[in-house]
């Protein structure tokens, strides 16, 4: 029986996306994995089609649903929420620059079952050497295995509880924004849920691999901030 709906929004970055999909497919618990292709190139689209039967994910092409330009995270979250609620299972976002371990999803689900007050449950992110990295550097000195936090969770690898999905309709998300990690984290707290980060269930994160232009923040910060503010990219 499927225990979680796992979604991965994708915009190109095909190699990391396939790494993500294969890792999810190796999970110790049965899940339904949907990749949402958000106006990727024709080559990426073809590769996603080619590998879906082999790896075992479902594939949705956003271009078949809307002509709104990428990113379409709001639509993806809305579609996923509807499916998760209909199935009565948690929703897990695993982004396309993240690699889970075989037990990651099982551990997230166990935390959820042990704490009914949970709204969001996230896995801490680490680099290839196992050191805490972006976007969870704020927790790099934490020694506890599990922490409750008032700070925003990233959706790199984050589980949404069924109770939270019932309590907040994603149709209310701001159309003007591109990403909703901060808003949804705060909304869960406002509604009386607890947000938790699992420090003992790390996932490998290759920061911005799914959005290569953001690497400019380190190599060419002037160009990065021009794209971010003048071009209106990456609105949170």
Image (tube, rainbow, N blue to C red):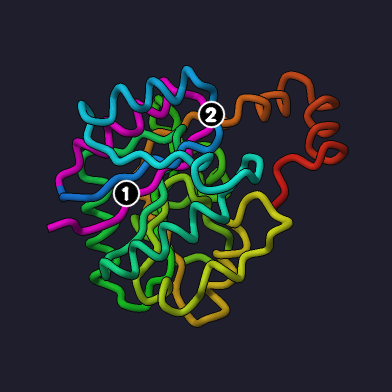
Q: Give residue 66's position: percent from left, percent from top.
A: 57, 47
Seen at 16% across and 50% down, the residue is: 30
Image side of residue 100 versus residue 156, left or right: left
Q: Quadrant of the N terminus?
A: bottom left
| Nearer mark to the viewer, of 2 and 1 | 2
Q: How many numbered discs sit on the rendered protein? A: 2
Q: Which secondary structure, mark 1? A: strand
Reply yes or no: does residue 14 show up in magenta: yes
Q: Give residue 231's position: percent from left, percent from top.
A: 83, 37
Q: Give residue 207's position: percent from left, percent from top.
A: 54, 32
Mark 1: give few (<14), some (14-19) or many (20+) Cα within 10 Å. some
Which residue is disc 1 drawn over?
A: 200
Pick the front one: 147 or 96: 96
Which residue is disc 2 drawn over?
A: 40
Quadrant of the image occupied by residue 35: top left
Contact between marks 2 and 1 (CB within 8 A): the answer is no
Pick the front one: 9 or 20: 9
| Vertical placement of residue 79 versus 101, above or below | below
Label 2 to label 1: alpha-carbon separation: 34 Å
Pick the front one: 33 or 145: 33
Magenta residues, start to end: 1-28
Q: Which secondary structure, mark 2? A: loop
Seen at 45% across and 77% down, the residue is: 193
Reply yes or no: does residue 173 show up in magenta: no
Mark 2: give few (<14), some (14-19) or many (20+) Cα within 10 Å. many
């Amino acid at each position: 029986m499927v225990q979680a709906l796992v979604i991965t929004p994708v915009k190109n970055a095909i190699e990391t996306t396939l790494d993500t999909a294969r890792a999810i497919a190796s999970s110790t618990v049965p899940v339904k994995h949907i990749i949402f292709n958000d106006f990727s190139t024709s080559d990426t689209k073809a590769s996603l089609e080619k590998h879906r039967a082999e790896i075992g994910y479902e594939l949705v092409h956003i271009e078949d649903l809307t002509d709104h330009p990428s990113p379409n995270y709001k639509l993806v979250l809305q579609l996923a929420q509807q499916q998760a609620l209909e199935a009565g299972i948690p929703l897990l976002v695993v982004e396309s620059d993240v690699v889970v371990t075989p037990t990651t999803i099982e551990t997230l689900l166990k935390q959820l079952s042990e704490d009914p007050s949970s709204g969001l449950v996230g896995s801490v992110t680490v680099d290839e050497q196992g050191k805490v990295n972006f976007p969870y550097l704020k927790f790099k000195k934490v020694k506890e295995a599990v922490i409750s936090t008032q700070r925003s969770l990233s959706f790199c690898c984050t589980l949404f509880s069924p109770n939270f999905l019932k309590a907040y309709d994603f149709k209310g998300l701001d159309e003007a924004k591109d990403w909703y990690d901060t808003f949804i984290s705060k909304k869960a707290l406002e509604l009386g849920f607890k947000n938790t980060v699992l420090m003992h269930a790390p996932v490998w994160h290759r920061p911005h691999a799914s959005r290569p232009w953001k690497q400019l923040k380190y190599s060419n910060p002037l160009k990065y901030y021009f794209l971010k503010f003048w071009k209106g990219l990456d609105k949170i």
